[in-house]
Image: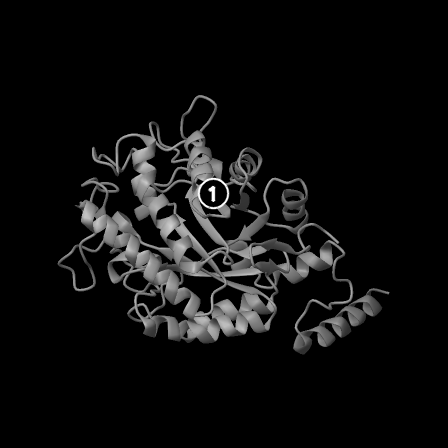
Amino acid sequence: MSTLFSPITVRGVTFPNRVVVSPLCMYSADDGMAQPWHFAHLSTFARGKAGLVFAEATAVEPEGRITPRCLGIWSDAHAKAIRPITDFIKSMGCVPGIQLAHAGRKASTAPPFQGATPLAPDHADGWQVVGPSAEPVGPGVQVPHEMTTDEIKKMTGKFVAAARRSIDAGFDVIELHGAHGYLMHSFLSPISNQRDDEYGGDLEGRMRFPLEVSAAVRKEVGEDMPLFFRISAVDGVEGGWSMDDSVALAKALGEHGIDVVDCSSGGVSGAPRFRIDDAGKPLSKSSARKPGFQVPYAERIAKETNLKSMAVGVIIDAVQAEEIASSGQADFVALGREIMHNPFWPLHAAETLGDDPDFKMWPDQYGWAVDRRSQIVAMNKG
């Protein structure tokens, strides 16, 4: 069996394979509530037999949504609306996961298919955004309210409450979103965090809020639930967060209850920048997005810490994914756009790698017909 399709256990959860559906924002919720679209969307990936199926970035409070149409889990009713989805994912032998998030200073925008326009606080669908400092993401974007220390501590409590509801909703994995310029990442990066109190300044101060959230969530969920943490491994902006900082953060996250570091990049300011060259200069967005462009970040986390890592970013085919897993570059391989393009990617990858020649991984309702299709194709080729 390939490494990609071999089981892996983290704490009390065994994943049937290493393929992960990355959190994919759908911008289709109603007041944060899951809709039929969410069931149809996520259940497809479970039928495709991804080992871990993440729900999208899910806000811990209404003001934590990226857009007014983003998913939330700030009430028990939100958790109840999601429960049928997690039940179905489990019925397919897959593991349901949720990414708990707060968009911070990048909140209050229109969905991308409606222009991704920043919405002012006085807009009918907008609200005041928050952050570690009164530093906007870029020109024409809201200036965030600088959070007080009391507000920061209350925010930790909102993550804890969301984690409790996530368990009630049936999730077996929680990921904390500390990437892409959202709230926790904005505390980490010196680009966005200009504070001079205990939540700013040096690396230790800038890491304090994410570490407090991690420790508090670990205490709430107990010792059996795996906790992931998504990072932007580099800001890709001169003077910003670096890969060395990410290694230091990962080691600290491990001490505060995190098991797996999900390695993305960029998003702290302006247009996204994803890689820097040997001279420290940002590469253009187009030049950076090559197959596996973020895998080296996951590889370094895996090699320099005691944590597991997850790779994401233009992972396209089965052979590429298997090489990442079998070489130890990452323990999990996450797909986003590719698995939206082909929701049954894991099943096709297992066939390609020789792990499922008889289509036994397929749901019973499909497997017999797909097997027959294969026989017909083979006969016609003959």
Residue at left offset 35%, top offset 32%: 237
List the single residue furthest toward the left: 122
Left or right: residue 138 compared with residue 188? left
Residue at left offset 78%, top offset 62%: 357
From the top left corner, tell me how far across and down residue 276 is, in percent: 44, 30
Q: Is residue 360 above or below residue 336?
A: below
List the single residue furthest toward the bottom: 365
Quarter of image, res 37: bottom left
Q: Report if residue 144 is visible in the image.
A: no
Residue at left offset 46%, top offset 39%: 250
Left or right: residue 153 compared with residue 279? left
Q: Report if residue 295 is visible in the image.
A: yes
Q: Is residue 114 above or below residue 325?
A: below
Quarter of image, res 296: top right
List the single residue furthest toward the right: 382
Q: Secondary structure at mark 1?
A: helix
From the top left corner, tell me how far across and down residue 50 is, in percent: 59, 61
From the top left corner, tell me how far across and down residue 274 is, in percent: 43, 38
Residue at left offset 26%, top offset 42%: 137
Q: Is residue 125 above or below residue 185?
A: below
Query: Which residue is more in the foreground, 289 or 328?
Result: 328
Report crowding for label 1: few under 14, some 14 to 19, many 20 or more residues within 10 A (C-alpha): many
Quadrant containing the N terminus is bottom right
Amino acid at the residue labelled 1: Gly
Q: Which residue is mark 1?
A: 254
Q: Is residue 4 above or below residue 28?
A: above
